[in-house]
Structures are given as structure tokens and as C-alpha cells.
Amino acid sequence: MTDKQINILLIEDHEFTRLGLAMKIENTPRYNLVAQATDGAQGVMMASQYNPDVILMDIGLPKMDGISATRKIKEELKLDCAVLMFTSRDSKEDIFAAFKAGADGYIMKGSSSENLTNAIDSVATRAAWIDSQIARVVLSSIQNENYIQINSAKNPKEANKKYGLTKKELEVLSLIVDGLSNQEISEKLVVSISTTKAHVHNILQKLYLTDRTKAAIVALKEGLV
């Protein structure tokens, strides 16, 4: 959790959902809701005007969808803000498209308030965040279809600066992305299972995560492997 105030822009076209989210944000002392937008085009304009720390973005928006709005904010406006997709869409096409457009996190509508605040806090520090349900979809697609990494443009050494993973931890992380179990990693690297478990534990700590699936997705999102 961060103690710094987080300025949030909410972009959501469904009034009931937007009002509920706005209430959650306003009831969290460290959050400041700077503005609300009801379509993608308005959201891009407000992002440029307020330059928030975090943008909570729906995908199915009128006038300009959330993925296009994210791409415009990240690539054209080059704003230094985090975009957290908040959506009911869980297709691999939408997920991959969102991350390719520059999204920093992806959370499903219906997630608990605790999950939502964890996601906002994570992306606010520029750490990637992904819903467990979405992580399983993405990892399954990667392993079954040999999907090219989400952010192949990033240099692994540059991407690793904020995490500080060792060379061996990066090697283990790469094998996790490939779907190997701890036992399989141990056999491949010719190390004990306890050594592999220690590496996995350190990786999760450094990535601020609690499970291997999310670690694999963050590795791909951040260009670590």
C-alpha cells in the first residue's frame, strides 16, 4: 500500500457502475477522484487535462473504446499515468489487445473492493497487476498457442531495473512462463527442489505477487523474459 495520495480518473459509461466505483474511490482516504468520463473520447480529453496517477478504464465505451483510448493516452499523448482496465470482458483477444495498447493492469468487474484497491495501489507504483481469473486465461493461451510475449519491445535488462531480479531468478521466471513445475525447473537447472522454491519465493516477493500464474503474466507484460 502507498501512503501517497493517488489521483484517479474514472472512465465508465454505465451510470450505476460508475456511481458505485466513484463512491468506493471517494470513501478511500488516499484516493482523490479528479474526474469522471462517460465515453472514450471524453476520457482521453480529461486524461490530458488532469494527468491523473491512475485511470480506471472500461473497454466497452461509446465513441472510442477503452483499448483505443488507452493507446491514444499512452502512445500519442504520452501521459505518465497508469491505466487499469476495469471490465467484464475476459476474452484473450481483449486482454492481449489491452496490454499491447499499454494497459498497466486488468481487473474484472465484480471483483472485491479489496482486490480493486490492491490493483489501483499496484499500478500507481507502476507495477503491473492482473486479475487471477484473467491470468489463467492468458497463461493458458501462451502455453497452448505459443503466443508471442505481450511486450517484446522492452529490453529485459531495462525492464528488470525496478524489480532487481538476479540472473538466476530471471532464468527461473522464464521457465515458469514456459509452464514448468518446480520439480521440472529443478531438473532442468540441475538444482535441488528447495533451491528452486527459494528462487520462486524471491521472485514473487520482488514482483509483489502471491502466485506463479500472475508472475508469468507480469513477466510477459513487463518484458522481463
Image (cartoon, helix red, strand yellow):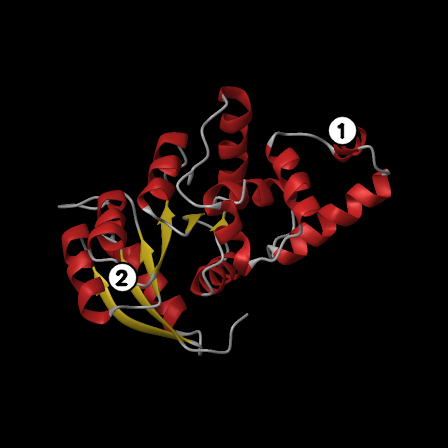
Which residue is depicted at the point 53% across and 21% down? 144
Q: CA distance from mark 2 to mark 1?
A: 42 Å
Which of pointers 2 and 1 lies earlier in the amino acid sequence? 2
Q: Along the line of sight, which residue is nearer the eye, 55 or 203? A: 203
Tell me the kind of residue under disc 1. Lys
Answer left or right for 145 relative to 71: right
Q: Which mark is residue 215?
A: none
Q: Is residue 212 above or below residue 53?
A: above
Question: Mark 2 falls on what kind of element?
Answer: loop
Answer left or right for 160 relative to 58: right
Task: Determine which quarter of the picture holds residue 176.
Answer: top right
- From the image, which quarter does the N terminus lie in? bottom right
Q: Along the line of sight, which residue is nearer the eye, 74 or 120? A: 74
Which residue is depicted at the point 76% across and 35% down? 182
Numbered disc in front, either 2 or 1: 1
- Tell whether label 1 touches label 2 (CB within 8 Å): no
Residue 171 spot, x, y in % from top left: 66, 40
Which residue is label 2 attached to?
79
Which residue is label 1 attached to?
188
Task: Determine which quarter of the picture holds residue 186.
Answer: top right
Q: Residues within 10 Å of mark 2 (few under 14, many from 20)?
A: some
- From the image, which quarter does the C terminus lie in? top right
- How many marks can you see? 2
Residue 53 spot, x, y in % from top left: 35, 67
Q: Along the line of sight, which residue is nearer the eye, 207 or 137? A: 207
Question: Mark 1 falls on what kind of element?
Answer: helix
Tell me the kind of residue under disc 2. Leu
Q: Is residue 126 above or below residue 130?
A: below
Residue 94 spot, x, y in % from top left: 35, 35
Q: Residues within 10 Å of mark 1 (few under 14, many from 20)?
A: few
Answer left or right for 17 relative to 76: right
